Image (cartoon, rainbow, N blue to C red):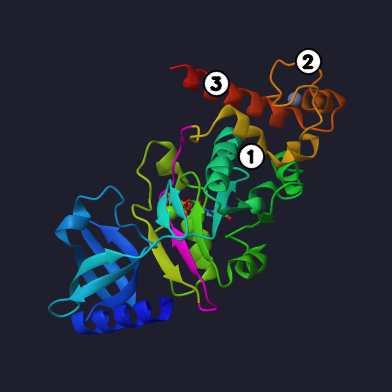
Amino acid sequence: MLTISRLVKKILNKQENLVEGLVVRAYGGYYYVSAGRDEWECRLRGRLRYTKQQVLVGDRVKLRPGHGHTGIIEKVLPRRSLLVRPPVANVDQAVIVFAVKEPDPNPGLLQRFLILVMINHIEPLICFNKVDLSEGAQVDIVSRYRENYRVVITSAKTGKGLDQLREMLRGRTSVFAGPSGVGKSTILNALLPGLKLKTGELSAKLKGGRDTTRHVELISLPEGGLIADTPGFSSLDVPDLNPEELAGCFPEMHSYHGKCRFAGCLHYKEPGCAVKEAVEAGTIDEACYRQYYELLEELISRRRY
Ligand SMILES: Nc1nc2c(ncn2[C@@H]2O[C@H](COP(=O)(O)OP(=O)(O)OP(=O)(O)O)[C@@H](O)[C@H]2O)c(=O)[nH]1
Ligand SMILES: [Mg+2]
Ligand SMILES: [Zn+2]
């Protein structure tokens, strides 16, 4: 049955001359769709413009060719994942880039982003960049995440860690995300000689200059896979989840699951909490627990309204 309906679809597509492709950039109401060696400049079919689920970079679409290499997007194919901030469809992994210095890392923002990524079933990879700026110094923040996440340490300037990063990107669709000025575009330029993404001077940014990267863009890797450069962001709402789900987003706490006195313990103010005992004993990092606690309070107060 399935194969017959597929066959019918294929025949219909052919009759309609629709082209299947990948949205690699979008701005000003135009969508740039890559199909084979061609790139099509497309508009959306009217009814798609009014649907809630917009067409995003990373979407696979069907377009109707017009003059030259222009077209109309008729249909968006089902997504396998969706990252809302930055908005990219069909992502396998999010490379969360922070600088060890200039600008200093913001652990609260990193934590929120980790949660956002994990609840969307996208695999996180933390990239600490600009290690050339802290040569020799022990970087606390790095060791804190190393135990529980995949971490790569890079310098786009000296090339350190770039081979390892390249290996981790092979064959997958990855999004580079993180605050402005941490070096996302510089890393991509270093990974792909010939690519010339605009990068910015940090001093201008700290003085309130504009983000250098203004749009999401998907780029093909020669060794297979896609990477998206995205504009930096400096804040992120607490992701939308129930207080009960929050502990599941902290791998540091996983081994204490079910060990508290009360079933459904939020590790908040309950007595006999195994997580709080572990924090006191120093087996769970205190900074990590503090972040959990603050996020939990936000989620609880949000539920009250
Ligand atoms: N010392 C040092 N500087 C770096 C490194 N990587 C990037 N930079 C510098 O940091 C500044 C910002 O880099 P960008 O690549 O534009 O940062 P971005 O994350 O793409 O920023 P947005 O596009 O605004 O989000 C530039 O001046 C880069 O030269 C690094 O590894 N070490
Ligand atoms: Mg950039
Ligand atoms: Zn507990």
Q: Residue at x 37, y 56 (%)?
A: 216
Mark 3 and mark 2 lie on one chain; the one further toward the N terminus is 2
Percent x, y of residue 254: 75, 39
- Residue type of the residue flagged with mark 1: Cys
Point out the stretch of residues depicted in magenta.
222-237
Q: Disc 3 designates what residue?
A: 300
Position of 211 relative to 193 (above/below): above
- Residue type of the residue flagged with mark 2: Pro
Compute the Cα span from label 3 to label 1. 16 Å
Q: Disc 2 designates what residue?
A: 271
Mark 1 and mark 2 lie on one chain; the one further toward the N terminus is 1
Secondary structure at badge 2 equals loop
Percent x, y of residue 50: 20, 50
Percent x, y of residue 73: 23, 67
The N terminus: image quadrant: bottom left
Q: Which mark is residue 249?
A: 1
